Structure formats: C-alpha cells, structure tokens
Amino acid sequence: MVEVTKDIKYIGVDDTDLDLFESQYIIPNGISYNSYIILDEKVAVMDTVDSRKEAEWLENLATALAGRQPDYLVVQHMEPDHTGSITAFMERYPEAKIVASARAIQMMPQFFEGVDFSANTIAVKEGETLSLGAHTLQFFAAPMVHWPEVIVTYDQTDKVLFSADGFGKFGALAADEEWACEARRYYFNICGKYGAQVQALLKKAATLDIECICPLHGPILKENLGYYIGLYDTWSSYGVETEGIFIAYASIHGGTAVAAHKLAEILRAKGAPKVSVADLSRDDMAEAIEDAFRMDRLVVAAASYDGGVFPVMHDFLHHLQIKSYQKRKVGIIENGSWAPCAARVMRSMLETMKDVEIVEPVVTIRSRMKQEDMPALEALADALLS
C-alpha cells in the first residue's frame, strides 16, 4: 500500500502477465490497474480493477480498510479494466453507495447480468461535491475522454486530481522506464481521436489548484506537473512535439525498404533535425502511430498490392484516420512492378485527413530503386525540408 497523502492510499495492482492491452497494444512491461482509497469520516474507494486481479485488489482494499467499511465507490470510467471487480466489491460491502455519472449508471446493466445496483447508486453532475468529512470531492464531466460516461474527481482538501484514463501510460508501476514514451504511445492510441475533448478537460483542470495527479494507469504524478500537462496540451491540440520526419514503409520483397532508407540517408545528409524509420510489417503499429503524431512530417512508402496498397500500409493509414491525424506534411513513395497504384490509394486516404499537405513529387519506384530514381528522391527530400 502506497501513501499518496496522509489520507489517500494507493491500492491498485500490476498486471505483468497480460500480453495485449485492449487485445491490440503490446505491453512488454505490463500495465497497472490503479485504485485509491480516501480514509476520512467516510471512506471512498476510487475505482476497482480488472477482474484478472480482483483477489489481489480485494486483499489490498481490506488491508487499507483495517476493519472499516467503505461508504462510497466512485466509478469514473466504465471500461472493464476499471470496473471488473464492482460485483465482488458490492457483494463484500453491500451498504456502499456507487457514485458515478448518470451515463455510467445507465451503462452498468450492460456489463453486469443479473445484478441490480440501482438502489446503491448516486448520480453526480458537473461541479457537484461529496463531503467525506475533512475531504470534499468535486466531480467534473469528461465525456469522450475516451468514453462518453467518464468523470474525473478533484479532492479539494489535498488538491489531488483523480484523472481517470487521462495522464495514463502503459507499463506496470514496477517497471523502471521513462514516462513520456509509453504515455505518448498510450495517449495517441487510446485517446488520440478525442483531442478536442481532452482540450476541454484541460481547460477545466486549469481552474483547479492541482498538486498531484492520480491516473487509472501508470505512476502517480507529483513533481513537475507542468511538464505532463504541457505534453498533454501539445498532444491534444495535434501540435508538434519533435521537429523531424518519420518514414513508415511497407515492403514485400525489400525494394521499397531500400528506397525508404535511402530517403532517410538523403534527409540526414541535407540536415534534417531528426529522421526515424519504421518497417510496418515488423515494428509495433502502436509505436508507428505514436511517431507519426510526434513529428511534424511523415513519409509513407509502400508497394502496390492486388490493385491497391500493401495491407500493413492500409492498416497504418486507417489507424491515422480513426485517430484524427492532422496538421502535417506528408510525402509519398510507391513501388510497383507492372501497375503502380499504391500512391493513388495512399493519397485518397490522406486526403480525408484534416490539414494534411501532400508534398510533391510523389515518387514511383519500379521494382527496385535505381540511379535514375535519385533525382526524384532528392526533390522529395528538398520539398520536405523546405
């Protein structure tokens, strides 16, 4: 049990056995399911955990309670990794009241068949408060960050923001790793579509005196909060974090890969501040999405395939579409042995994205890069750097 403040304790758990978060994101260092308890005249538990770790969490909760009974369970987000232990909690503490948004209460029967919590629920609205004694909790709606029912909770006494999935990251708490990399990968893949909604939440947070942020995943943030909030402001406004060029390629037999790496070499020689290259067939897709958002320029290089584009590139661009990729310069390289068509498909997908500028020239490689392709690659490099 970790002390957040004198009255607030961390009672969450690490999950280092799960291979894929949300069945799609690689988590080599696991994930934490964060839960907290506020011990006052009345006791409030802040969220439960995934059912995978229910027994461990209940043990942590019982230890923290030390024989007391919880009065409230605050449910900030209905996703199963945070609500998977609600039934077990209510079976053990049937007198407790569940505090949540009206939308969350409405959603509960969808997750818990044959269980009726309606007699134990309290719906809270924007700005409403709940007194625990010395501590007063204030609730703020955070719709579509990243589900519609989300609330965040501010403890006015200890100046702690319980931020739901906001400011979360991949990785168990026991993992010794830098915050920004896995928080960035988490943000753009989980919340990236909802930049406007995150901006709205940041504006609410700016009115509060916050000394500590307690997210539902990742470490408790106490020092240098301006750094974390500043990154979230950049990410959610689709601003540029790192000036540089990200080259994502999809190559069948290696010809497109050679062209992509050659362009990277040309860009570095011309003084590009940062150039990063990813093989979409082999590298982590979530990390490729992260890098595309992180940098201010993107190059997509892909082989033609079945009258379209090689599938991993289509998947990459589809991810960018659904995560609201925008405000970037993008260059295109296509490869084709008899009927190059990858550029047409990539352009059509890019043109659906807001404020994306497609840089000319579009470079077409025929099977293998040759000396005659160099002027076009040089011209594309110059256009990207202009």
Image (tube, helix red, strand yellow):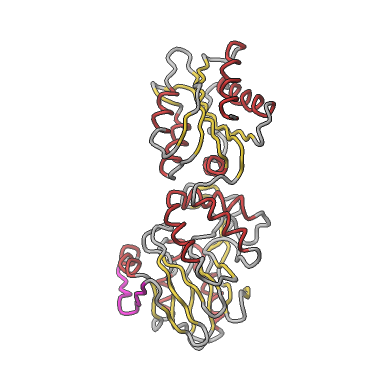
Identify which residue, 114 or 140, lies in the foreground.
140
Q: Is 5 above or below relative to 369?
A: below
Q: Nearer the viewer, residue 109 or 98?
A: 98
Q: Residue at x 63, y 75 (%)?
A: 3
Quarter occupied by residue 375: top right
Out of 155 and 31, give the one closest to the viewer: 155
Quadrant placement of the C terminus: top right
- Against 276, residue 190 (above or below) is below
**Residue that extends furthest to the front in the rendered view of this protein:** 386
Numbered disc total:
0
**Percent from the top left, x then y, of residue 316?**
47, 36
**Residue 357 left/right relative to 103:** right
Placement of 204 over or under 248, stated as above or below: below
Residue at 43 percent across and 26 percent down: it is 309
Give how far across and how far down residue 17 sits, in percent.
56, 55
Q: Is residue 360 above or below residue 172?
A: above
Residue 227 in percent (x, y) is at: 62, 58
Let me know if residue 115 is in the magenta part.
yes
Residue at left offset 47%, top offset 84%: 132
Viewport quadrant of the N terminus: bottom right
Magenta segment boundaries in residue numbering: 114-125
Residue 253 relative to residue 89: left or right = right
Q: Is residue 162 left or right of residue 117?
A: right
Residue 109 image-quadrant placement: bottom left
Query: Is 347 one of the magenta-colored residues?
Result: no
Report x, y in % for residue 19.
Answer: 54, 50
